[in-house]
Image: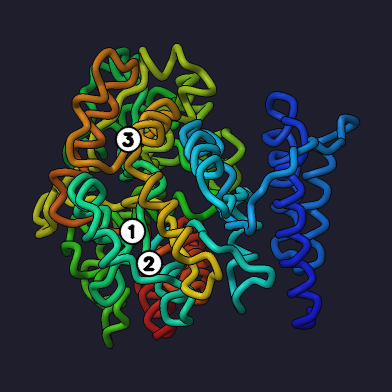
Amino acid sequence: MTIDDDMLARRLAVTLAQAATALPGAPADAVGTVRRRFARRRRRVRVLTGAAAALVALATVVAVAGPRLGLRTTPATPHTGIIHLWTLGTADRNPGLRDRIGAFNDRSDVSVQLSTFGNDAYKRVMAGPWPDPAPDVYENWGGASLTEPVRAGHAADLTDAVAAHPEVADVLLPCVLAGARVDNLLYGLPMTGVQPVVLFYNKRVFADAGLEPPRTYAELLTAVDTFRDRDITPIALGGSERWPALMYLAYLTDRIGGAGVFADIAAGRPGAWRDPALKQAATLVRDLVNRGAFGPAADVTGYESGAASRALAAGQAAMQVMGSWEYGNQLRADSAFATRDLGWVPFPRVAGGIGDPAALVGVPANYLTVDAQSPYRTEAVDFLLRTVTSDAYLDGLLEAGEVPAVRDLEPRLAAHPHADFARFTHRLAADAPTFTLVWDQALPSGVAGELLDQTERLFRLEITPDQFVAAMAATR
């Protein structure tokens, strides 16, 4: 594919995302139906060209809109410019975002226009050369997805602006703000709740087996053996998407060798991939596969399709290691299960490991960053400062099943239906000595792609732990 083809595909993805804001809402589960069909196709065709990806995106829009394709009419406004805000589609789950956009547009000469993207489409659009047309404010995961725009001059330094607004600086969790720092300067503010990876479990299945949720790795192995003997998949794994498998490797490395192991890898220090903790973690992963921890269909079961989550809810699987967003997914899919039989504990500690058992792996938050080259940079920064710690925005996160990244959450939880999970998640984040970003988001895209490929091969028992380490060491 030529550069021109790739640029065309990326521009088409942007156009479709912007057009989608003018389309009527989709029927229930329409997007899920399209995604599941595409996931089945993707297992047969592993690599799509840019043009093919654009066609898939176009097909998705058409399928979702269906025969109701038509544009909403928007009244004329006196606005003199537009702040283009790009986010993932999950941003629509927070009603507070729309509220804050409306409030800002009512008082400002410049309006905010939201465009939302699917996960794969957004990664394609933001990869490589800076998008044209470009966003004024854009969502990112921190890590490499923030460092690269900073180096390219497309991220505004928010350090002084936030320091001048204590109603923002004094409210947000420091460990979350740390995820948006590059060279000790602040380039983003959290737009999502804190999202640590935890171990979810089916309370009913555990009670029937007479087991408590595992707090140690030895207890996890006991649970794996017990459920395997009861013909229940011990751990639901959406292996077809690869990134869920990487969570096990990341947490085991952290528990065995501490957060410094991956910090060295992310910093590109010589020999970092050959730290003994990584090989030991890869060995434990291989042992889990051989032990039958993930059942026979882990490499074809999907997470984004909902298959792994449904297995947990149905009692076909006993556990699932996943980000805290799983709670919201379960709540939307089966609120009775989520509020009655869904349990959660921190990822187990490993005996003999030097990692702090309170350390977290996950996504401290997704961030909103202002393009330093935006003609509306000042107005965009003002929008962020007025939005991310506002009552409407934070309450909207809670309503969506997320846990706001604020220091004092308790006053917002009075009579809240999801208070137990919110308290658990908030306590983990507030007490965490380190909060390591999931590896595929923390690393540059080329290294992350190789890591996902090698992780898939490790889980399929196609390579040994030594071969895994050697392959990753060759990337630096």
Way the structure is coloured: rainbow
Dot 2 or dot 1: first in sequence order is: 2
Q: Quadrant of the C terminus?
A: bottom left
Q: Is residue 253 above or below residue 383?
A: below
Q: Which residue is situated farthest in the right direction here?
A: 67
Q: Label 2: how many residues lie within 10 Å, few (<14), some (14-19) or many (20+)? A: many
Residue 185 locus on image (x, y percent): 27, 72
Residue at x 83%, y 38% (from the top left corner): 71
Dot 3 or dot 1: first in sequence order is: 3
Q: Is residue 429 left or right of residue 399?
A: left
> Residue tagged by mark 1?
437
> Residue tagged by mark 2?
143
Residue 403 locus on image (x, y percent): 32, 35
Q: Is residue 15 above or below residue 11?
A: above
Secondary element type, mark 1: strand
Nearer to us in this view, 299 or 407: 407
Does the rendering let one see residue 49? yes
Dot 2 or dot 3: first in sequence order is: 2
Q: Give the quadrant of residue 189.
A: bottom left
Q: Label 1: how many residues lie within 10 Å, few (<14), some (14-19) or many (20+)? A: many
> Residue tagged by mark 3?
403
Residue at x 57%, y 34% (from the top left corner): 306
Residue 266 locus on image (x, y percent): 32, 74
Residue at x 71%, y 59% (from the top left corner): 14
Indicate the amino acid at tag 2: Gly
Q: Is residue 106 left or right of residue 463?
A: right
Residue 284 locus on image (x, y percent): 29, 55
Marks 2 and 3, Cα distance to the nearest angstrom? Answer: 21 Å
Q: Is residue 326 above or below residue 373?
A: above
Indicate the amino acid at tag 1: Leu
